[in-house]
Image (cartoon, rainbow, N blue to C red):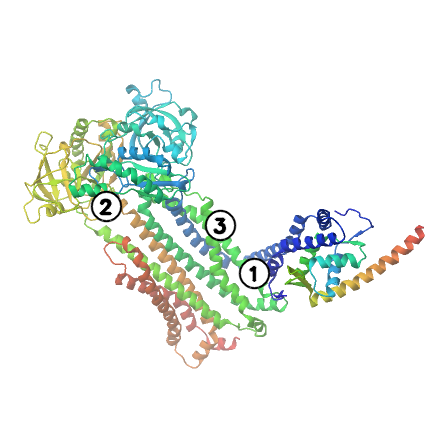
Amino acid sequence: MTRDGGDRDRRGGRGQRALDGLDEDIRDHLERVTQDNIDRGMTPEEARRQALLAFGNVTLVKEDTRAVWIRIWLEQLRQDIRYAWRTLRRSPGFAAIVILTLGLGIGANTAIFSLMDQVMLRALPVDRPEELALIDAPGIYQGRTTGTQVMSVPMFRGLSAAKEADVLSGVFARFDVRATIGVGNSGAGSPGSPGSSAASSTERGFAELVSGNYFRTLGVGTALGRTLGPEDDRVPGAHPVVVLSHAYWQRRFGGDAGVLGRDIRINGHVMTIVGVAQPGFNGVDLGAPVDLFVPLMMKPALTPTWNDLDSWRSRWVTVMGRLAPGVSHDRVAAALNVRYRQLLHEDVQTARVTGSERDQFLRKNLQVMAGGRGKSAFRDQFATPLIVVMAMVGLVLIVACANVANLMLARSAARQKDVALRLALGASRWRIVRQRLAESVVLAAGGTVVGLLIASWTTRLLIQMLPFERAARALSSELDIRVVGFALAAAAATVLLFGLAPALQARSAAALTTALKETGRVAGGGSQAGFRKALVIAQVALSMLLLAGAGLFARSLHNLRGLDPGFVPDNLLHFSLDSSRSGYTRERSIALAKTLQEQLRMLPGVTSVSMAVVPAMTDRQSLQTVRVQGYEPAEGEDMSPAINLVGPDYFEALGVPLVMGRAFAPGDDERAPLVAIVNQSMAKHFWPGKHPIGRRFSANSRQPEGAVEVVGVVRDAKFANLRGDIPRFFYIPLLQAQTIDAMTFYVRTRPGIGDPFAAVRQTVQRLDPGLPVLDMKSMEQQVSDTLFPERLVALLAVFFGVLATVLAAIGLYGVMSYTVSRRTREIGLRMALGAARASVLWMVLREVVTLTTAGILLGVPAALAVSRLIESQLFGLSSTDPLTLAFAAIVLTLIALSAGYLPAWRATRIDPMIALRTE
Amino acid sequence: MSTKQEKERIELLQGTLDMLILRTLRIGPSHGHAIAKAIEQGSDDVLLVEQGSLYPALHRLIKRGWITFEDGTSENNRRAKFYRLTPLGRKQLDIETGRWDKMSAAIARILRPARETGR
């Protein structure tokens, strides 16, 4: 006999111990009976049969035995919860405050988690997403690159032929592209014929060009019709078929099953709808849900100005594959690299590279990365802000829990006599702890319900705030099982955080029984007050952390806002025309640009109008490799400055001053000599200390050396966004552009008349009613949109910082009120002995200052340590910015003092006579 | 599973099993199989214990604090639970035995005259 059965054990634990080894006990029992039977002369089989017969149904016995314990446990749980419910109903104010506090905390956490889950955690809604891999070909390259982590189509074809290495069960390529979609009226006799365009509407949509095994490799099926297969991906331009996304089908066609076989015009090309993809699948980029899936071979129709289906010198497709079962990324990379090296030898033949560059080129390796969550620039942009905000709301939840714990302790102090009475009547201490916990569980359950409501509402609000219409479409504010699961887990965590301390306090206070003997004063109050003060210090420290973060983010946003972008965003309106996708040739686009410039300039209040191919402040940037006459690039030097094709008056319209030379004139057209304007950074880089006007360079491989002459220099200006550094930049006249894909128009007005949105739109529509006016916005709005992640983080940081501080102030107020009420007699005595009111006031406030200072002293090093993690998110200030820390500390101290002032003031109002008489 | 065997056997009344277990354990700690055997043999094999029902009963008694258990090794060197009477259980046994005596005497007084008149 080794272990003691243990009368000391609690009920729950003892049940578990008794049930341990039940199976073994029963087996042992049966074997013994069998043995007895054998001893009586039965055969072993008969002996076993009789033993089982005498025992009865083994499973049933086990169930009955377990039920002995479960029933009592459930019964007690029911009792505890009912008791908790009754006690809480007696103090609805307390319950409401706690539930609301927890609801805010859980709600904020759930809302952010919901977004984080959708943006960062969730896998693509495809078959076994964990097997998907993204294949990237990084390293030196020569040619045009569209997007990130992309390859040329010949390279993709070469690699997909290599899957005999049986490390991949499938490979596909895809490319995301804008499209002008025209849907004819369903009754139209000959859909797609030019005459029917009046009866139909055009709109901007998004298409994904996909290679033949896209759907098969992803394991995505259809809701209707068929998917696209290898048979749709053979001859360029010969497969005019599309599959709609389920969401687009619902939105545009109301889920009409009759769409199959119907025609749709994409950039003016008639294509046939052959299927609708399975619900929930919107392509492999979660920030860019697509409306249509089109065979890769239809690229000429989707991008009228460039084809590149056979060019090694243009990288634009994302390549993904599905790993064969049990194959690691490393093995795939090793197997594919063998083939990749062979393909590179073919690739390098058309590349214009020097000898050492050639070696580097041939030494490149493929990279194979997890692709189960697809690929998303949106995710890359929002991952860090989301993590930061998630950390903030986590801290807020802790502060909220500390507050609730504080309230619960104050309440349990008031109920100590009640507890002592019940202990005296024979209630077990464990049972009382459980009852306390049950109360916490009921409160947390209430908090979860409120939290889920707040979460659903907050998520919807945040999604509506997103200035990225397309990404917002991919996000949902619905509370799915994962989100609800998270809320429940958060609630369970809060029970541990706020419920355990008061519950254990009820248990550990063995001296409680003495509470019965003491009449008015409460035993154990001293240690309890100490614990509550510790909670307040922790709250102040966490608030300090959050306020410091809020200060850093707010000042960083302020710095970005106050930044001189180098152009004038006020009184500037812009919009885009997707001319090439609406059937415009280069010549028609140029004619359109000229006419629009003239007509828009005549609108009242308009001072200048211009246009450019690459839109400003959209995070887009086009790079072009140059060869500069008389400039010898260093080994590995980046020779690709940013380029834009701009119309006449562009710099005037944007408010970028010319510092040298001349601006583009209407005469700088295709018949005139090629000219360029460069920014100061480019001039300084290539011609340091020299006069840049008249210098020459060539801007693409087809141009002869020095074909372009620099005629002007403009001041450096931010272009893609406010945050980034200003790159070397050069501008080419729009009239000298070889192709025009799309144009963004800029309309500057006189200050004070407002942006003439309607007049501009009418002007465009009068010229061509079939040409959609896209993204019309004021430039100020556009600039502000690029700052959205920063604005969002700053806004939430300030909100949660203030919330945490208010919660901490409430906690402080509660503790100080409690302290003052406990010291009523002592204060009364002091006053009776002649203490001045001011000294009583100071006595209480001194404690407030002590608590706050302790919190701040703990909070500052924590803030310094944590803020280093957000350094990369800040702009124009250091993460250890002393001013911000000081500001946070001062704000906290002021709020703490005002929270402590009321109890302190009340202390000075104590009437010594009354105080001394009360027990 | 109360198939009749060679002798006529009586099934136990609800609750009486608990009392018999307590009585058996009064002699000393014992494991499950031994308790079942003791009850059957002690009653000269008249009382039929459906042996499986012993286990819920044992756990019920543990829960009420009337018996407790210890993990030990049995004579054939196997792990087994040994059940032992607690002081509370001993008191309970006394109460139950007293109640049983009173009840069986009362029932006997009623039944015996009735049977005589019936004959």
Give the residue at x 43% y 26%: A257
Residue A177 visible, this angle: no
Query: Can you say whether A747 is above or below A239 in the image?
Result: below
Q: Is residue A267 left or right of residue A274?
A: left
Query: Is disc 1 in the same subunit as disc 2?
Result: yes
- Which quadrant holds residue A809? bottom left
State the quadrant of the N terminus of chain A.
Answer: bottom right
Q: Position of residue A882 (x, y in %)?
A: 26, 63
Q: State the residue position of label 1.
A: A434
**Camera-side residue: A439 or A600?**
A439
**Which mark is drawn over residue A721?**
2
* Disc nearer the start of the sequence (3/1): 1
Q: Earlier in the sequence, mark 2 or mark 3?
A: 3
Q: Residues at badges 2 and 3 in contact (C-beta under 8 Å)?
A: no
Tell me the chain of label 2.
A
Mark 1: give few (<14), some (14-19) or many (20+) Cα within 10 Å.
many
Q: Are marks 2 and 3 on the same chain?
A: yes
Query: In x, y percent, where is residue A546?
Result: 35, 59
**Residue type highlighted by circle 3:** Val
Residue occupying image coordinates x 50% and y 62%: A500
Q: The residue under label 2 is which amino acid type?
A: Asn
> Is label 2 in a helix, a strand or a loop?
loop
Residue A860 against residue A81 in the figure, above or below = below
> Is the residue under label 2 in contact with that under label 1 (CB below 8 Å)?
no
Q: Disc 3 marks which residue?
A: A449
The residue under the point 80% across, 61% down is B100
- Position of A434 compared to A589: left or right? right
SS at mark 3 in the image: helix
* The residue positioned farthest toward the top in the image shown: A189
Q: Secondary structure at mark 1?
A: helix
